[in-house]
Amino acid sequence: MILVPLPTSVAVLTPATSANLGPGFDTLGLALQLYNRFDVEVVEGDPQTPHIDVQGSLGSGLSTGPDNLFFQAFTLLFQRKQVELPTVKIRMSINIPPGCGLGSSATAVVGGLVAANELLRIKGLAVQKEELLAPAVEAEAGNHPDNVAPALLGGLVATTTADGEIRAVKTRFPDALKAIIFTPSFPMDTVTGRKLLPAKYSRDDVTFNTGRVALFLTALQTGRYELIGEAMQDRLHQPYRQALFPSMPNIIQAALDAGAYGASLSGGGSSLIALASSNFQAILRAMRETARLSGVDGSGMILRADQVGARVLTTSRSRKRKVSGYHFPSNSLP
């Protein structure tokens, strides 16, 4: 038993993301100003039995047991640092619809790691934000970085793997652009969508996408937004996932006709994302009306890009007190 100034609580805010952005299948992701909040309080009890309270109807289907994704990511960092897991009470405020291509699971993974990292700071074991990317990819169900990277870092993030290491480069997304999000009332299962993709692609399809990734990034960098429509086209996953969302092309075209520069499936769906610098409400109305005419109900949002990524909102510490369930062994790894 030791005496330490114990961090008793931490609050973390983590943004939604739009992965597979345009032609950037498994490589490009954008953070958005829609957030899940996670409040963690150190309490007495069994470390393996978290007390989890999920707030918001969108989170009604989330687990409140040890298999909760936030808690698993939280636990992972303590295990990596060989530090005994504290008993925690977790309050999750869910504003991002799960299973709809807006990175809800990525917020849980990143939020858990960021919260754990902040509680480990007292022992000098906290790491830089960028160092949380590798465990985040490991904890994410599909082990894809294009959701967790923008959730962690914010902005527009390009990711790849080189020599076994994940590389992520963040750039500021233009403030002139907003994302118009249409989310159908039905989710799209990522695993099912992946199974629809071919094992191999033609050279023409690969060249089509790589050229448009280059065009998309250049258009954003130079302000040539009129090129975004061509640049956001995709041949690697959208045509195949369309089987799960047949009205998707019509809704995308409605966004373009109403003034959007470009539009695409967000993540693995079912949400769609359109980029524009004006006519936001008109674009959203056009998307919703076209969907309605196809028998698809849904909701919409107009969001700016989040340029910061996951952040710690508050950290509270008690005075020094005796601790037995939150022990930092002397041989903890740096």
Image (cartoon, grey):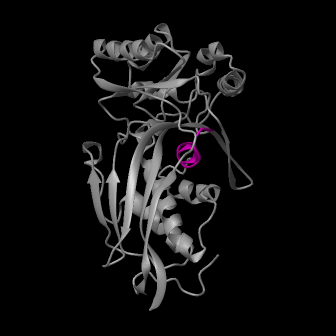
Residue 307 visible in image: yes
Is residue 239 at least partly visible in the picture? no
**How would you classify the magenta stretch by its main secondary structure?**
helix
Return the x and y of residue 37 as percentages of the image width and height: 39, 50
The question of residue 2 being in magenta is answered with no
Residue 290 location in percent, x, y?
Answer: 35, 12
Q: Any magenta on residue 151?
A: yes
Q: Is residue 53 left or right of residue 109?
A: left
| Residue sitting at the far bottom | 1
- Residue 278 higher or lower than 79, as above or below: above
Name the image quarter holding the N terminus: bottom left
Query: Residue drawn 64% across and 60% down?
Result: 128
Range drawn in magenta: 145-156
Image point (51%, 25%), residue name: 178
Q: Residue at horizontal 60%, vertical 86%?
A: 331
Q: Nearer the viewer, residue 163 or 69?
A: 69
Residue 52, placed above or below residue 80: above
Q: Nearer the viewer, residue 11 or 262?
A: 11
Total label count?
A: 0
Q: Position of residue 239 (x, y in %)?
A: 50, 23
The image quadrant where one finds the C terminus is bottom right
Q: Name the residue rendered at 32%, 13% in the picture.
A: 289
Residue in front for this viewpoint, 147 or 2: 2
Q: Position of residue 245 (x, y in %)?
A: 38, 25
Name of the residue lying farthest toward the right: 163
Residue in front for this viewpoint, 304 or 112: 304
Instruction: Looking at this view, name the residue that lies furthest to the top.
Output: 257
Vertical order, 83 against 244 (above or below) = below
The quadrant holding residue 96 is top left
